[in-house]
Image (cartoon, grey):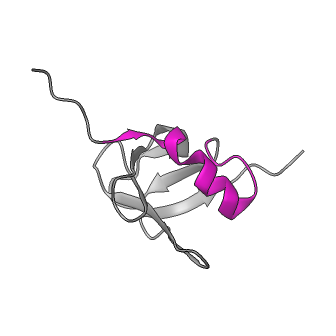
Amino acid sequence: MPLTPDFLDGNAAAGDLESVFGTDMTVATGRCRGCGQRMSLAQTRAYLRGPGIVLRCPGCESVLLRLVRSADQMWLDTGGLDYLRIPAPQ
């Protein structure tokens, strides 16, 4: 039986990230603090089975971004990114 990955691509986190940033974040780009790889958030590995969302680098598997939401609060950690570049609205 073939193994299936326990992650999706970063597009799976699009709705929650848009609720935080107010724009489509799948086209936002960043650089992994662990290995230096540059990628769009759509290219990351999204883990959704925990208490929140975890985006990991497709190159080295470092945690790039964590988002946890409760009924009245959201916590966002982008400590695994050197930067996050968000295209300006037209």
Q: How many marks?
A: 0
In depth, the one of 3 and 88 nearer the eye is: 3
In the image, is residue 72 above or below residue 57? below
- Residue 32 occupies which quadrant of the picture? bottom left
Q: Look at the image and tell me whether residue 40 can be seen.
A: no
Residue 75, percent from left and from top: 53, 75
Query: Farthest residue toward the right?
Result: 90
Question: Where is residue 68 shown, x and y percent of the image?
Answer: 48, 69
Residue span colored magenta: 7-26
41 sits left or right of 59 in the view: right
Asked whether 23 falls inside the magenta stretch, the response is yes
- Residue drawn at x 64%, y 41% as measured from the top left: 27
Q: Nearer the viewer, residue 21 or 49?
A: 49
Tell me the quarter of the image containing the N terminus.
top left
59 to 62, vertically: above or below: above
| Furthest-bottom residue in this view | 72
Q: Percent x, y for residue 51?
A: 38, 65
Outermost residue toward the front in this view = 71
**Which quarter of the rendered picture does the C terminus lie within?**
top right
| Residue at 50 percent of width and 42 percent of height | 12
Q: Position of residue 78 (x, y in %)?
A: 49, 67
- Position of residue 52 relative to residue 42, above or below, is below
State the residue at coordinates (14%, 22%): 2
Q: Is residue 73 visible?
A: yes
Q: Residue at 47% across / 62% down in the picture? A: 81
Using residue 22 as the reference point, say whether residue 62 is left or right of it: left
Which residue appears farthest toward the left when viewing the image?
A: 1
Q: Does the magenta run of residues contain 48?
A: no
What is the chief secondary structure element of the magenta stretch? helix
